[in-house]
Image (spheres, rainbow, N blue to C red):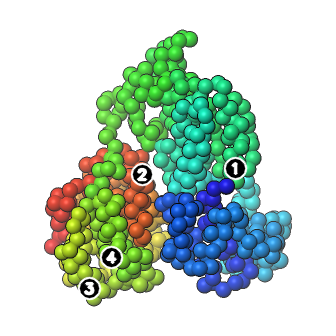
Amino acid sequence: MPVHNDEIAAAFDEIADLLSLSGENQFRIRAYRRAARTVRTLPGELAAQIATGFDPDRLPGIGTDLAGKIREFVATGRCRSLEGLRRSVPQGLRDLLALPDVGPQRARALYEALGIRSLADLREALAHQRIRRVPHFGVRLEERLRKSLETRGERSHRVAWSVADGYARSLRRYLAAIPGVAQVEVAGSYRRGRETVGDLDLVVAAPAGVDVDRRLRDYDEVASVLASGRTRSSVVLRSGLQVDVRVVPTASFGAALYYSTGSKAHNIRLRTLAVAQGLKVNEYGVYRGRTRIAGETEESVLAAVGLPYIEPELREDRGEFDAAAAGRLPALVTFAQLRGDLHAHTRATDGTASLEDMVQAARRAGLRYLAITDHSKYLGAVHGLDATGLSRQIDQIDALNERTRGIRVLKGVEVDILEDGSLALPDAVLGRLDLVVGAVHSQFALPRKKQTERLLRALDRPYFSVLAHPAARLIDQRAPIDCDWGRVFRRAAERPCWLELNGQPARLDLDDVLAREAAASGALISIASDAHRIEDFAFLEGGVRQARRAWLTGSAIANTRPLGELRRLLRRTFLK
């Protein structure tokens, strides 16, 4: 039975939760949290890498003990340490952790202060307004807990695209191997490249005699069957992810794929356009009366209603039909167009590889230039570089460029934007660099006006090239900062400096809506990996996917430029 990265990470997160409930030491808890983050964001499936001889203790923060647990999980699908912890912690307390406003520390506080050991206990305490009397809780948190209980079970099970990808690839391979199956594609929000995926929709082309439903039910990751039939099946994987499979003849494959890919609003618009032309569109094809006139390919479906092909990422009903009708659909940026990466780290701060190893990994990834942008010292959690340390790294990069062929290393830094908009390093050292990447790493909750002024002042500094992960969000973990983005984007375009689209799976920041707005303001976008490991250059693909959802072309992306042109543009970002 295949084991996915997300399952290993979820096990480590649960161990950390249960250890926290039990009052274990914080060092051990943090080790499991770090391990979960490391495994969850790996570009490839760890189980497959282990099968080829990879030792998980080579991963950052994964020592002998954790590596052993990973190997056990991959080999058996179980973790004995986790099972032991589950037996030692009452189920009721574990149920509390499923509520969005209750983490391990709050669950433990509720238990110690009020003896709450279950959801029923919590309900009773809320009814008598006892929660607000617990230190650090209060009336507002009490109300949030009440609402969380009321809506428990109603929340959709959505996972990050990068998590869904592992399940999607495995399932697609499995279904494609069924004798008689001609084509298989993953559709839905996964194919549109949304940040999170609610379920997996797969479209299969196969003749009537191929029993895809039975083979799906035999898939060893299936936990339960919701619906079973010759043309439609629905199952839930043991991860909790729902999978819906639609089986059609080859002549209808394009229509079914199109129907299953577009958002609800997009599909309604398409059907409305078809009706206006005396046509009918459904998952079997395009019909004039009872005659099917198209459906084998997606292109044929759109051509039947007089439109050119619309890329999957655009199928959200955000103007794509009007653009298609007017011949103004953008030629979306592709991964092949990227020439370099302007945001990467080494072990000089919080990366895991040496300067030379990161550069060689970037070269192997096909990049022609790489900016090394280790953190400034202000961000104490990562032991950042002060002016002396950065000067030393500048010299190291100059020396490396002398002996390296096939890729150019640019000298940069990721410098903290302080609360007043100043930067955490002096202009004297910033002026020696090829680019300066500024970022917000603190004071996320500043009021809108103050946060906006903070960013505007930072953009006005003499040395400022790229605003990194501008909204400072972490998907489903930290909300974006509150800011007047229109003002920030216009200032960036005028100055000029660039806005980053960070490809890390937990960030994807800017989001697609803001990235489209930024480009419309005239600001250039930098698609960045924010790589901290040699494997992380794969995160550029996530950045490209997000850029495509934002309607961005290659010309809107700074790092599609060849090195000479990029250098000329970078020099314009320095005002002195």
Pick the front one: 532 or 501: 532
Earlier along the polypeptide chain: callout 3 or callout 4? 4
Task: Tell me the SS state at disc 1.
Answer: loop
Residue at 40%, 54% (x, y): give it. Answer: 541
Residue at 64%, 40% (x, y): give it. Answer: 244
Q: Which residue is mark 2?
A: 546
Q: Residues within 10 Å of mark 4 (few under 14, many from 20)?
A: many
Q: Which residue is mark 4?
A: 355
Q: Position of residue 538 (x, y in %)?
A: 41, 59
Q: Mark 3: which amino acid?
A: Arg
For the residues carrying marks 2 and 3, which lies nearer the camera in this image?
Answer: 3
Earlier along the polypeptide chain: callout 1 or callout 2? 1
Disc 1 to disc 3, how far (Cα)?
54 Å
Residue 235's disc number: none
Q: Residues within 10 Å of mark 1 (few under 14, many from 20)?
A: few
Task: Tell me the SS state at disc 3.
Answer: helix
Q: Which residue is mark 3?
A: 392
Task: Tell me the SS state at disc 4.
Answer: helix
Horizontal side, residue 177 vs residue 552: left or right:
right
Residue at 18%, 63% (x, y): give it. Answer: 567
Quarter holding residue 140: bottom right
Quarter holding residue 311: top left
Q: Mark 1: which amino acid?
A: Asp
Relative vertical location of residue 138 with respect to residue 150 in this rendering, above or below = below
Disc 3 to disc 4, how far (Cα)?
12 Å
Residue 220's disc number: 1
For the residues carrying marks 1 and 3, which lies nearer the camera in this image?
Answer: 1
Q: Mark 4: which amino acid?
A: Leu
Relative vertical location of residue 314 with respect to residue 165 in this rendering, above or below = above
